[in-house]
Image (cartoon, helix red, strand yellow):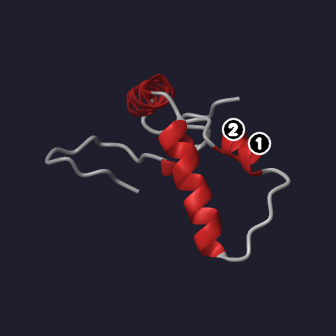
Amino acid sequence: MKIHLGLSLGCKVDAVALTSQTFNLFGPLKQHLGGKHFADDDGVQHEVLLWMRQQPKEFYAAGIGAVIKRWDKCINICGDYVEK
């Protein structure tokens, strides 16, 4: 995949490398939802929205900071980025 931002980066970027564990969201969300039962998708969506609204701004700021760091690293090595 090539990213087009009005200029050519000259390399391919793997979106999966940028998104995996980006916000570390799914671990805490999975913990929050664990053991709960929902009658339908609306119940799940409502609970997820409530949880997201309860997170402090620092939670999201840390996630955005991690995206920037990973994006920069991925671009600088032309997409050959795998975090272990």
State the residue at coordinates (55%, 34%). 81
| Residue 29 placement (x, y as % from top left) | 67, 45
State the residue at coordinates (42%, 36%). 78
Q: Amino acid at mark 2?
A: Pro
Residue of label 2: 28
Front residue of this view, candidates 61 and 3: 61
Screen quadrant of the C terminus = top right
User: Of all residues shown, which one is farthest toward the right?
Assistant: 35
State the residue at coordinates (20%, 47%). 5
User: Of all residues shown, which one is farthest toward the bottom?
Assistant: 40
The span from disc 2 to disc 1 (Cα, nearest Å) is: 5 Å
Proximity of marks 2 and 1: CB atoms separated by less than 8 Å:
yes
Compared with 57, 28 (above or below) is below
Compared with 42, 75 (above or below) is above
Residue of label 1: 31
Q: Secondary structure at mark 2?
A: helix
Q: Residues within 10 Å of mark 2 (few under 14, many from 20)?
A: few
State the residue at coordinates (24%, 52%). 4
Quadrant in the picture for residue 67 = top left
| Residue 65 placement (x, y as % from top left) | 42, 24
User: Residue 19, can we see it?
Assistant: no
Screen quadrant of the N terminus = bottom left
In the picture provided, is 69 more to the left or to the right than 51? left
